[in-house]
Amino acid sequence: MSTTLENNLSEETIQDEANIFKILVATDIHLGFEEKDPVRDQDSFDTFEEILQIADAEEVDFILLGGDLFHHAQPSPYCIYKCSELLKKYCLGDKPVEIEFLSDPKRNFPHLMNPLVNYEDPNLNISIPVFSIHGNHDDPTGQKQISAMDLLSTTGLVNYFGRWNSHDKVEIEPILLKKGESRISVVRIVSY
């Protein structure tokens, strides 16, 4: 192959990569499952760390968590601590985020005092954004309808979207993202 043709193919690949989303999708991690078992207590955390390691190694644009990050609606303090520790270890850093948030954050994150996608927050240094919904194991509960996902969202470690408090009225607000010339919409579909 000639050098010119190789250079052209290389340039096309680079241009294509500028338009292609690399997304790691994970669901049903169930952090805290069997947390009191002396043998299996770390299994869910080890799995979550492997997921984050893959995201880092593959240089994904973002991680999409499809619900049930936690096994219980009210996880233990250790469970929230360990989850936060892993997210900080793998998702904070100096790598620039290549995706643009096109949605109105006030509509996607109305539950936050400062509704902002975390990688656009000047007080955070996010290198791998995490977008997440809650599942049936970690949904908002109690009098104030607060979940562990709300806690993570408040810290800025995850972008918690699709939050709803009522089975009677569910509003769908898509997350609209752009990378290069490509655009995608991420929508939470209620299945329970």
Image (cartoon, rainbow, N blue to C red):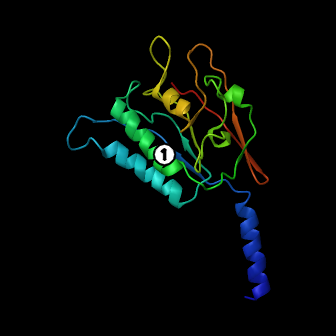
Q: How crowded is mark 1: few (under 14 residues within 10 Å), some or many (20 or more)?
A: some
Which x, y percent locates residue 154?
A: 55, 30
Question: Viewed as shown, does residue 66 lie left or right of 120?
Answer: left
Question: Viewed as shown, does residue 173 lie left or right of 4?
Answer: left
The answer to whether residue 93 is visible is yes
**Viewer-nearest residue: 26 or 119:** 119
**Viewer-nearest residue: 20 or 75:** 75
Q: In the orientation shown, which residue stands out farthest toward the top?
A: 143
Q: Quadrant of the rendered structure where residue 111 is?
A: top right
Q: In the orientation shown, which residue stands out farthest toward the left?
A: 38
Residue 58 to residue 104: above or below:
below
Q: Label 1: which residue?
A: 88
Residue 33 to residue 127: above or below:
above
Which x, y percent locates residue 118?
A: 62, 39
Which x, y percent locates residue 153?
A: 55, 32
Q: Residue at horizontal 78%, vertical 82%?
A: 5
Which x, y percent locates residue 141?
A: 46, 17
The amino acid at mark 1 is Lys
**Viewer-nearest residue: 59 or 85:** 85
Which quadrant would the N terminus be assigned to in this image? bottom right
Q: Residue at horizontal 49%, vertical 28%?
A: 151
Total tally of numbered discs in the picture = 1
Q: Quadrant of the rendered structure where residue 159 is?
A: top right
Is label 1 in a helix, a strand or a loop? helix
Residue 58 to residue 102: above or below:
below
Question: Viewed as shown, does residue 109 lie left or right of 66?
Answer: right
The answer to whether residue 29 is visible is no
Q: Residue at horizontal 77%, vertical 54%?
A: 180
Q: In the orientation shown, which residue stands out farthest toward the bottom?
A: 2
